[in-house]
Amino acid sequence: MSTPLIWIVIPIGFAGVLALLHNKPKLSSILTCVFTLGLVVLALVFPKDLAFVLPDQRIEIPSSLVILNRTVQISGESLTMVALLYAITLLWNLGNSVFKVSIWFNALSLVITALWVTVLSVIPFLYAALLIELIALLSVPLLSPRGKKTDLGLLRYIVFETLALALILLTGWMLSGVSAVPAASPLLLRASIMLLFGFALWIGAFPFHSWMPMISQTSAPLAVSLLLGLMQTALSVFLLTFLDQYAWLRNLPQVYTSLRWLGVIMITFSGLAATLQQNLARHFGYLIIMETGYSLLAISLTPQGGLPYLAMLLLPRVLSYFLWGWALSGIRQLQPEASFEQGSLSGLYHTFPLLSMSILVSMLSLLGFPLLPLFPQKQMLWLLTAQNAPETIPFVIIGGLVMLTAILRLFRLFIQPKGKKTSPNPAGEPAKLIVPIILMFIVMLAMAIAPQVILPRMLEILAPFTHLTLF
Amino acid sequence: MNISWLFIPAGLMLLAAEVNLTRRQWLVNLVALAVQYLSMFLLLTSVRAPSFALIKLIVGWMATLVLYITLASVGEFYAVKGPQRLSSGQFFRLLAGLFMIVFTIVFLPQIQSLFLMEGNQPLLLAAVGTMLLGLLQVSMISEPFYIILGLLTFLSGFELLYASLELSLLLEALFAGINLGLALVGAYFLVKDAEIEQP
Amino acid sequence: MPILVILALLLVSSAAIAISDALKPKVSRSWMIALVGAAISWLGVLLLRLYLPTDLSLFAWQPESLFNTRLFLEINYDNWPYALSLVTLCMAVIFTDSTRSFLPSSPKAWANSLALTAVNLLALFAGDPNMLIFAWVLVDALEFISTLPSRQSDHSAARLPTVFGVRMLSTLTLAAGTVSGWMVQPGFALSAIPSQAGIFFLLAAGLRLGVLPLNLPFLQSPEEKNGPALLLRLSPVASSLAVITRLPANLLANQPVWLALFKVLTTVAALYAAGMWLTGKNQHNARPFWIIALASFSIMCALNGAAPASRAWGSALLLSGSTLFLFDPPIRRIRFLPILGILGFIGLPYTLAASGWEGLLGTRFTFGSALMLLAHTMLVLGYIRHTFEITGTVTGLERHARITYPLGLILIVQTIVILMLGGWPGSLTSGLWVAGLASLLLAGLIASFYFWQGAQISALIQKQNFRFYRLGSVLIQGFQNILSLQWLYQSLGWIFRQAATVGLTVSRIIEGEGGILWSLVFLVILITLFLAGVPTP
């Protein structure tokens, strides 16, 4: 028994069982939820030194597993991240039990999560590029289920991930003899440029972003929010692996500046683009881009202590994505013909008050609006940015203001009085949709008012990165 | 070792990629894809043991087979068309592809120094040329089948390049998984779209 | 602890009314719960005067090395007068609303009023900026829930995004101010706002009050006359005024140009609003101008470096204003009660606003001071005018309302007296008695002139022949249009539409069939650009 076996191999095996049970969605859902809950709890309670001390003996669980001459290692310090990834899967699987996105949702979400865990654990870590490509391929049935025409955005997603794979692997090869090369070598600079562009393709940075709003528009909101949420969470931490492992990379003065400007451009661009959208579902793509921008901003402030805020952003951000996915899925379930086009959103509040407000709350939360869970961390990030990179502040402000404009535009649409011809939704919003929203509001409010209750635990995610300035 | 004969499979590989970029007849495309993998195998034997090189050939042909079976099963929708004259679009793609090949040949010395590969010119020519043609294909076409073909082409070029740089079993396995995955995804797209068009 | 008890009491009363109304509706029971809750809270706030200053630490965000926030509540001489005014207003609303107890919607309105008072008290008592930010968001959320647009009322629905947009902007400005303050003094309290951050706090409060920049989004919409609606409008004003009281003394001291600009803008706002108050159709229609005029007075105090003096004008805004606004239905026999409200802002020696003159006029008497004095005169005249012009058809009230209705108004007057006597150290003062006297004399002169020539002026106006009337009305209308900021929103909308056209075209190109090619072109260009800067080996 080893940690990779518990959190990678067994889940993939279990996903196989779930695939066989795809015709029994209820059973499959229950099994997935129970299983992922078990994985989350286990990851949280597992001793950090991976040793169980019994009265008469001490059992140590190995942290690595050798596959085809390469190692997959999950140390005790990485378990908080593993718990977070499986917690995300658990939450969305609970959602799937209500919305029934796809019969393959349970199995595929579990495999994809296990692969993300592998991405963060494989040695050499550059092989992760191939795993990320595999994840993209496995996402296809969730993003484009049968009965729906293949979306151009999805194809673009696969294309960009393939290009990123090539760039990252070539970087790896270039860096294989790096120890013999002086720090300011052109080879290193070239490698870091390729790495940067590889990452830009992965995370959907401008101008490689177009697939995000496209798949947000055409795919099921719950599936998109899960896949993009998982991807963003894992890739943010994966970027830290690069910085931690390559001393030359973190010592390159241009790296943090480039990351910062890339982040700031993403924040500003996403806000501007969001205001222009005619389709509600597409906003999600831009929200993801904005949040990736904030992640990059936090990482760029690593020497000044930005990383703890990155770690503490992960969970609240995911909750906001979930709220978004839930609300949109709820509307689509109650109104299957809902297209989310601007014209059809008029008066949405009068038909679905709580669901429509959830959409706005999730957007405001991601914006870092007070009394919502991303505010404490973002406020500190703004402070760090103002102190260390004041030249970027105007762009961050513009990005925030235009995103606020986009939110207000939606608000105006939602509360517009309905025409006399339209009758209110007779069924209203069923309790099974409303209760989780209310619970989520409460959790989000608690996190915003008292971030010290849960969020400090998230700092453990940073423990494996011993070479980076953490506090 | 005399490697000049390797220019033949390299040329063949580029030709296959060019055909896939230009033509829109799935049977021709799949045959070209199979030829592409065969050429790749021949090129790989210059840097790998034949047993290792064979893996890529088998995986490539399996991917081709998956696509062939799928297309054959939804044959009514994707009917086999006879030889056609080049349309203006196809002619444009042909020229663009040729330009890419010429570009690769002209800048081959620079590319060699970039990848620190002084010896194996045919392999580098085939790898970089195929990658560029694959990229051109994915950027110029929006039909799922041809995008998947483009990606397979791009990947085969990249694998060829990477095989000369690093050898790892796990890497080989993952590449095999990705190639087959791409083929399966392509098959999935074909079936799905055919179901919508022909309910 | 007493702070929490007061807040809890108001919230529990609100919840009790809601539950009672849901289970077994009975208006008298709901009214009694509301009254008892408000009365005990009022008494609690009054007694807190004996323990000033006092604070209540809630908790600090952990780890403290990563956060600068320690949430705490504080009550001192800066916010206590506002707290008492607000609870008074709440209680008065419940007293006077007994005239409307026949309406089935009244219990809900009372429950809302109590909850709204509680969250606004939270904002008033906020000791640190984040506590204030949270309280403001809560206030806005509660206000949103209270003013939910109905399915058919397109009028208010159209304006709500503007109103809440301004509120959100003000909250974010406050957050920006907090960050700006933390740069010099991490974890500062509201009682010690760093001067660097002061401008943000001023703008945040100014935005909420509608003064800086002057914005009147609700100008065209009809003002609700009832008490709970008044509370809904005035309570957020109270929490904004409390921020102004705490602004640093050296606000904008290093930026004289900005200071001068803000003073001009504030003076213009005060004069315009006072003029509109004086000439308004009735007190309800002119209510936004009353708020803006007196809020401008408060802001001017802060700009003159005497922020604590703003308490006088702020309390006057709440108390004197509500004496007049709550006088509905107007009963002829008790008309003297709203007149007593004038005590709150007349500014004569030993009245509530006497201590506010020094802040309003500044240390040196300038042209600006004269204009502010004129604005005050117009406010006084307007108040008197509206009091005397109140007409109504109601001649009598129900038996219980005959006692409770005047009691509500008396309570406000009584609070004016309490604040006058001991609202804060130095509240009972002769102040700049000359200013008060001058304003009163000027008001007297204008009133005399009006009564002397009034009939003729009215006739001229009615005939629309008065030489300057047309020009004046056009000017005022234009000014009003400017101040409503509709032109700004329309211009922004136009810019947005043009940008959207360009943006959507670009988006179509990137997302179209050649999108990947475009992205690859970008990639190649960027890589080439980067590599161009890298020397070859």
Image (cartoon, rainbow, N blue to C red):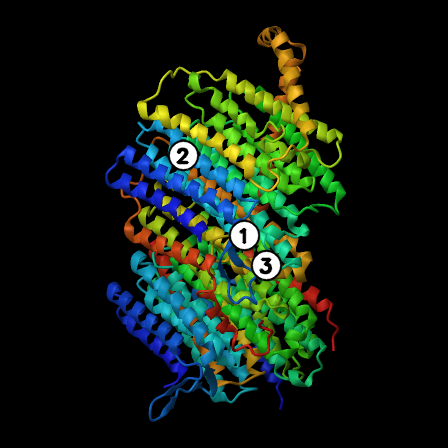
- Amino acid marked by disc 3: Gly
Residue picked out by circle 2: A417
Taking C97 as reference, is C187 left or right?
A: right
Which residue is nearer to you in this view: A326 or C369?
Answer: C369
| Residue occupying the point 70% across, 39% down | C304
Q: Chain of mark 3?
A: C
Taking C420 as reference, is C534 left or right?
A: right
- Amino acid marked by disc 1: Gly
User: Within 10 angstroms of label 2, few (less than 14), some, or many (20 or more) residues?
Assistant: many
Which residue is nearer to you in this view: C147 or A401?
Answer: C147
Camera-near label (2 vs 1) is 1
| Residue occupying the point 70% across, 64% down | C529
Residue picked out by circle 3: C187
Camera-near label (1 vs 3) is 1
Which residue is nearer to you in this view: B126 or C80?
Answer: C80
Camera-near label (3 vs 2) is 3
Q: Quadrant of residue B62?
A: bottom left
Q: Chain of mark 2?
A: A
Report the disc number at residue C127: 1
Q: Can you give x and y, in whole percent of width and height, for residue C121 in the image?
A: 47, 45
Please determine whether, in this image, residue C419 is positioned above or below residue C379.
Answer: below
Q: Can you give x and y, in whole percent of width and height, for residue C488 in the image?
A: 61, 35
User: Within 10 angstroms of label 1, few (less than 14), some, or many (20 or more) residues?
Assistant: many
Kindly report the distance in space between the C-alpha atoms of the residues bearing marks 2 and 1: 40 Å
Q: Is label 1 in a helix, a strand or a loop? A: loop
Q: Can you give x and y, in whole percent of width and height, for residue C125 in the image?
A: 51, 48
